[in-house]
Amino acid sequence: MNVGTSGNNGTNGSTPHLRLQMLSNPLYLSGARELVSSVAKRLGFPDTACGQIALAVDEALCNVMRHGYDRREDAPIWISVWPFTDEHGDALRIVIEDEAKQVDPAAIKSRDLEQIRPGGLGVHIIKEVMDDAVYEKRDAVGMRLTLVKRKAPKPTPAPTATSAPAPNASGNSDV
Amino acid sequence: MSDETLQVDVVEQAGAVLLAPQGELGYNEAPTLRQYLKQAHDKKPTRIVVDLANVSYMNTPGVATLVESLQISKRNRTRLILCGMNDKVRAIFEIARLNTVFEIMADRDSAMA
């Protein structure tokens, strides 16, 4: 597992504050999860949010290892971290990239929670605990998941008679 | 090279099997718990209790193992009871809306009573 500060995540051109390269080996899951949780803690995120960030990263990495790489343990995964501030306040962006098989982002959906069966819960949990979770194909190979967690919840616009629910950036409103 | 160790204490008492895993229950450890659950189901007990008091962290592979076991329990007419969840573990079940699907009790004593 390498931790460095160089590299470009391919999403906005800025250099990540932290960039970690790890193998798709579940041995390193807890280390990756503790790293992002620790960074979030030092950036002032409350304990509950740090736990949620760690859980989302863990679920995302599990999905890459199980489904993207079909349990191969020697393939690369990159985790990049940027704190940022916008009109909604302080936030943390975490980007997880891989070289696994590409899938249509619209096909990555939370499963119907009324179906009681093992599997398919990871995407639901990620979208539930993070403020944004967007899947996209990388240019050449692999997938990219961009996660955003805000220190304070983003205000929800008041509903109007003409407004319709907006799908998230992955085109999937089935959350 | 994967660390797949998970310590699970097993207690058999009056037709019930109690499993008490210790540590994290995630991608690495879920297959071990699945094996213990399978062995418990094979004994056809009246109830299986999974005491999570010493589980510090759980993610969906752990949850999925318990869902799988719940389905076997229903087929076998065995009660499956979870107990001793800490707040972090309970939150996973709530997010997945599985807290109303499982029989959940506060602690081992009430689950085995």
Image (cartoon, helix red, strand yellow):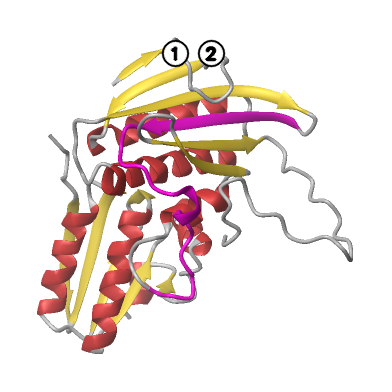
Span of residues in magenta: A89-116
Say if residue B10 shows up in the picture: no
Q: Quadrant of the N terminus of chain B?
A: top left
Say if residue A148 shows up in the picture: yes
Residue found 83% across the figure and 51% down from its top? A157
- Give the residue number, with chain letter if any, for mark 1: A7
Task: Identify the mark nearer the N-term, 2 or 1.
Answer: 1
Residue found 17% across the figure and 77% down from its top? B13
Residue found 31% across the figure and 42% down from its top? A101
Q: Residue furthest right?
A: A161
Mark 2–mark 1 CB contact (< 8 Å): yes
**Foreground residue, A144 or B91?**
A144
- Give the residue number, with chain letter if any, for mark 2: A15
Taking the magenta stretch, the answer to whether it contains residue A168 is: no
Give coordinates of residue A29: x percent, y percent: 32, 36
Q: Secondary structure at mark 1?
A: loop
